[in-house]
Amino acid sequence: SEKIRIGILGYGNLGKGAEASIQQQPDMELVAVFSRRSPESVKTVNPNTKVIHVDDAEKHVDDIDVLLLCGGSATDLPEQAPEFAKLFNTVDSFDTHARIPEFFENVDSSAKPNGKTSIISVGWDPGLFSINRVLSESFLPEGETYTFWGKGLSQGHSDAVRRIEGVKNGVQYTIPSEKAIERVRNGENPELSTSDKHTRECFIVAEDGADKAKIEETIKTMPNYFDEYETTVHFISEDELKRDHNTMPHGGFVIRSGKTGENTNQIVEFSLKLESNPEFTASVLVAYARAAHRMNKEGLTGAKTVYDVAPAYLSPQSNADLRKKYL
Ligand SMILES: NC(=O)C1=CN([C@@H]2O[C@H](COP(=O)(O)OP(=O)(O)OC[C@H]3O[C@@H](n4cnc5c(N)ncnc54)[C@H](OP(=O)(O)O)[C@@H]3O)[C@@H](O)[C@H]2O)C=CC1
Ligand SMILES: N[C@@H](C[C@H]1CC(C(=O)O)=NO1)C(=O)O
């Protein structure tokens, strides 16, 4: 049968990961990468990948089944997702948790009237961790759920700091509190505030002459990303960044400890250990592109979240094979 034709909007860490992931899919092909930069300045991993300026994306609506939106959540996706959901089925990784409800509405009002399917906030958190929080709470109504990330590089937070005026480049690491994890694993079911669970550490390359004190203050007070955390900011050189911060490992786990029956302890846990946060996240986006294409063909249009997507839509296996080989 025909391959699913994928486009990538935005060629950063996620865009690169998506380019690689699509090559692993038997039922997909990459039609083009769209970028806001001039095509000749975008160096793709696969030299055969076609790069087209984003202003020409509209000309390709009939060549693409699903467009993967790989821009940053801090500033790109809030404007790109509603714009491109009018033209394409889309999948995005929007991860500003507090703003997901308004983002959903904005994308839905673009996708629905145009008969498009847009699956938002795909990845691992939000995404797979979100699914596990809901599943474990549905099966264990009595209990406590905890989410821990890292130690690792958060792409959302790294993208957010890179957008600050005067920042030339930068990364952010998320560090879980070992003490908090220990208390959860001991079954204490502790009340933990946001700042009890994680601290954040940034390594920033400032533009020449930039106001470093202002950059540090902007990071530490940034709503939804840093303002609820104890954050440390280091200023380093471009060379140090390239030397000491050139990998993007991450991971974490969702754990729910609950009770059934009279007083029976039950633990549900889902964990990830990622050598490359962007490559894994991109692989999740690509599987959800398969779902967006299929759901659209069934007339399931408008904005969706991972909660709306039955697992069978994600697999390249037929439903009959899933029943036969995986149940
Ligand atoms: N839900 C989840 O679990 C996860 C979500 N995410 C989300 O993914 C988002 C994207 O992450 P990431 O790919 O690391 O972001 P990047 O900063 O690598 O890329 C963001 C955009 O910046 C532009 N860009 C990239 N490289 C350059 C460059 N060298 N010069 C100029 N512009 C550049 C690209 O747009 P263009 O090509 O148009 O210039 C790109 O789409 C994050 O903001 C985060 O919110 C990430 C991981 C997990
Ligand atoms: N969205 C996150 C994925 C996970 C990592 C994270 C964090 O370190 O705060 N929160 O969610 C990312 O961009 O990497």
Image: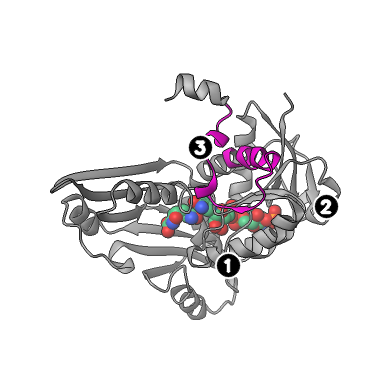
In the displayed structure, 158 sits above or below 208; it is: above
Ligand 1 shown in quarter: bottom right
Q: How is the image coloured?
A: one colour
Q: Which residue is mark 1?
A: 102
Q: Is mark 2 within 8 Å of ligand 1?
A: no
Residue 288 is a magenta residue: yes
Q: How far separated are the C-alphas under marks 2 and 3?
A: 31 Å
Question: Element under label 2?
Answer: helix
Q: Position of residue 57 (x, y in %)?
A: 80, 51
Q: Position of residue 213 (x, y in %)?
A: 48, 80
Residues 46 and 80: in front is 80
Q: Is mark 1 within 8 Å of ligand 1?
A: no
Amino acid bearing label 3: Pro
Instruction: Residue at the far right: name it.
Output: 59
- Magenta-highlighted stretch: main secondary structure? helix
Q: Which residue is mark 3?
A: 311
Q: Which residue is mark 2?
A: 58
Amino acid bearing label 2: Glu
Instruction: Residue at the far front: name it.
Output: 261
Instruction: State which tag comes first along the sequence, 2 or 3.
Output: 2
Q: How far separated are the C-alphas under marks 2 and 1?
A: 25 Å
Q: Residue at x 64, y 43 (%)?
A: 292
Residue 216 disc label = none
Residues 212 and 156: in front is 156
Which region of the structure is painted magenta?
287-316
Q: Residue at x 21, y 44 (%)?
A: 266
Question: Element under label 3?
Answer: helix
In the displayed structure, 294 sits above or below 241; it is: above
